[in-house]
Amino acid sequence: MGTTISTDLIRGHTDTIILNVLRQGDSYGYEIYKKIIALSGNQYELKEATLYTAFRRLEQEECIVSYWGDETQGGRRKYYRLTDKGQEFYAQNTKDWIFAKEVLDKLILNELNSDKLALENLLEGGINNE
Amino acid sequence: MNKKNNQLNNQVKSYVESLFSGIGTSQQLFDLKEELATNLKEKTLDYTSRGMDEQQAFKEAVISMGDLSGLVADMRLLGQDKARQAVYSTMTARISLAGIVFGVLLTLFGIFTIAMLYFMKLPGEAVAGSGIFIVAGGALITYSILTRETTARFGMNKIRAALYAISIGLILFGMTTAFITRYSTGEMFIAIGSLMVFFLVGVGLFLFLALTETDRRKSSYR
């Protein structure tokens, strides 16, 4: 039996993942979908239904803007582009993620005894900062 | 191949239509349908290029999209706002229709009164005095026509339409006062003098409005 990422875990990061794709160039729905699969090394698929909902939300928050491509065959594509605000949002989310990942690693994997040092370091740091 | 492509086009289109059936239209819904259709078609073609037959590919593509009910609900909300707008615009259409009818009746009443008083051989100023009904009628018709929304144009903003109505009213009023003063004083130069005041203001206002006109054509008629 394989392992999966629970939807609860990924939900808060959908926007950041999309911004990461668009950071690397303008793209449209189905291509973004494929790029996310490729980014995960074929280990994760973000459903298109989730993507379209996120596009609408990100556009309302002015993190992305959309424009129509000029394909003549087989329908126009709706492309998305990252805005400056989206870029900032992505940078902030990345920072938050790196911080959260470290803390979560400790919270989930470490044992209190073996990690006494890490905990002490953390406390000392807190005191020194004051 | 082309025929097959068309068949897929229709299949995708009717699937997307059925997904959002019974939902009030909005620009967003229109765009979303096109976006979904384009991507769904591309995905289906991707599957067929891997050797899947087209019907199977289409089914797989639809299933793999995931649960679209959230999007459908979003669009339904937008559509409801639109329905409210539609009620509102038929409301203004009715007011505008009533304005046109009443304005025309008022103008006709003025014309008939003038004719009647004229043939009663009343003094000229009394005859011309009834022109005030035509002034009011003309202004009302102007306002009502301009605020009317048609299939090709949006209705004009109410303040702007009112200014147009005032300018037409002033021009007509200027002519009425000219006739009245002509008959009451018997002097043409006084008549022209009193015509000038209202007429010039009216024409000035009209020109200003006409030259600052914005495009009210609906996008699909542009």
Image: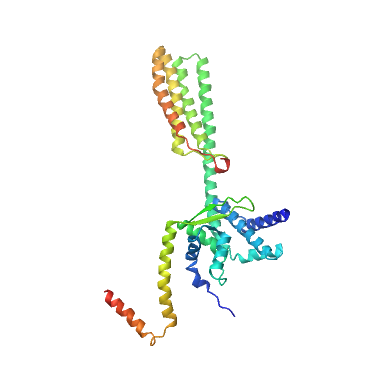
* Quarter of the image that includes the C terminus of chain B: top right
Viewer-closest of B207 and A89: A89
Residue at far bottom of view: A113
* Quarter of the image that includes the N terminus of chain B: bottom right
Viewer-closest of B191 and A11: A11
Q: In the image, is residue A32 above or below residue A120?
A: above
Q: Position of residue B157 (x, y in %)?
A: 47, 39
Residue B70 at least partly seen: no
Q: Position of residue B66 (x, y in %)?
A: 59, 66
Residue drawn at x 65%, y 62% is B46
Q: Quadrant of residue B56?
A: bottom right
Residue B196 at least partly seen: yes
Decide if residue B5 is on the left or right side of residue B199.
Answer: right
Residue drawn at x 57%, y 39% is B152
Viewer-closest of B86 and B207: B207
Residue drawn at x 41%, y 73% is A100
Q: Position of residue B48 (x, y in %)?
A: 68, 63
Decide if residue B4 is on the left or right side of residue A12.
Answer: right
Decide if residue B170 is on the left or right side of residue A39.
Answer: left
Q: In the image, is residue A10 above or below residue B38?
A: below
Q: Position of residue B147 (x, y in %)?
A: 50, 37
Q: In the image, is residue B117 above or below residue B107?
A: above
